[in-house]
Amino acid sequence: MSSREKKSNCSLCRIINMLITVALLGVGGYVIWYFLGQPSGEDIANTFGNIDFGDFSDVLENFTGIGPDLWNTDPFVGDNTTFVWRGTDGVGGLDLDMLNALDDTWQSEYAEAVNDWDNCNPDALTLTTQQVAVDNACTQVDGVMKVCNGNYGETGWLGINEILKTVPNQIIQSSVAKMNEYYLNNAGYEERLYTMCHEIGHGFGLPHTDENFMNADLGNCLDYTNSPRNNLRPGEYNCNRLKTMYGTVDGAARRLERWLRGGNTGDDNVYELQQYRKALEQYQKEPVNMQDETFASKYERAMKELSTDLLLHRRNLKHIDAMPVENEWRILHEHPRGGAFVRRLNPELALEVHVLYPRN
């Protein structure tokens, strides 16, 4: 059989199939019309014209588990949990001392990141930096955030933030942020700045804004990204979240603080600033003794165990269902580029760690 004859037969088959389909539809329609009492065309038009389809606004009202909170359970949307520093009551902003324990190679990234957070809009932070000796170990100092760098080895993390918080009210007592030069020493400036901004942001008590790398970049450094240059700044979203946590900085106190940083130390202004800080301190709890040897050894052992578990791909860690007992790590949440882990150090304190994994 020639190819022309085959095509002719195929065309004939399609025509026959179409005719059979039309016939079946016609017979089916006739049967339905017959059992409906053989209505006229006008009856059919009037019936459909009287149907009120409504706006379907309540179509899901009887379904459970569907509503605005559904989207908050997306495993790739940032964890919405926040916690705040002691000495704050939700108004007046956060006045926080920062210890710069970085070496000379990280000063530009630190200065840019801190300046960005300090000038958030809306303005919720007053950050005061003190230059201290380089501290690769990055030991916790009560009541402040310390930022450090060092070659911490093949730990599996680019950056890490370690937060000490009270149990059960989860008030931040201190924080350290570390940049791992094993991965970042030869990285570009943008990736180093992104990591710095990211880990400092966790230190304020902020969670991630988005953990899905396939989503469009949100333009803030707490959004996970494969293109750090797109997410180098705190962004409006995080600034607004800080406002809900701490309130906005009082304008007069803010101007005074910055004026004093510029080197002017008039007695009246110093007194006013001291009174302002004293008012904030009325909310503070008794400070944690970071120099206690028992506590320090517990802290060091906990971080060593976490590092081992991270290198073993977290196979020894369990997901949290409640605040863990002492001496046991739990996974708060985890994703391909990072995770958050918590461990109770004693009846009053827990250690929460946020880890940023390398992109490759």
Image (cartoon, grey):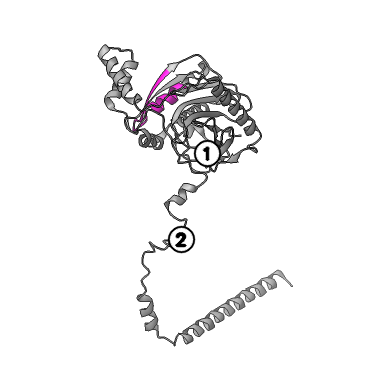
Residue 127 lies left or right of residue 340; in this view the side is left
Q: Is residue 3 above or below residue 346?
A: below
Identified at 61% across, 78% down, the residue is 16
Residue 359 on image: x %, y %? 58, 34
Q: In the image shown, does 193 or 124 lie closer to the viewer?
A: 124
Q: Is residue 137 above or below residue 89?
A: above
Residue 225 on image: x %, y %? 52, 37
Can residue 186 be seen by looking at this rendering? no
Numbered range of the magenta stretch: 109-129
Question: Which quadrant, please, contains the C terminus?
Answer: top right
Identified at 54% across, 28% down, the residue is 159
Q: Is residue 138 inside the magenta stretch? A: no
Amino acid type shown at disc 2: Phe
Rendered image: mark on residue 323: 1
**Which residue carries the number 2 mark?**
63
> Of callouts 2 and 1, which one flags the residue occurring earlier in the amino acid sequence?
2
Question: Which quadrant, please, contains the N terminus?
Answer: bottom right
**Element on which disc 2 rests:** loop
Identified at 38% across, 26% down, the residue is 284
Q: Is residue 114 inside the magenta stretch? A: yes
Can residue 261 be seen by looking at this rendering? yes
Q: Is residue 183 above or below residue 214?
A: above
* Labels 2 & 1 near each other (Cβ < 8 A): no
Separation of marks 2 and 1 at Cα, in angstroms: 32 Å
Q: Quadrant of residue 295?
A: top right
Determine the residue located farthest toward the front in the rendered image: 347
Q: Residues within 10 Å of mark 2 (few under 14, many from 20)?
A: few
Residue 144 on image: x %, y %? 44, 23
Q: Residues within 10 Å of mark 1 (few under 14, many from 20)?
A: some
**Element on which disc 1 rests:** loop
Amino acid type shown at disc 1: Met
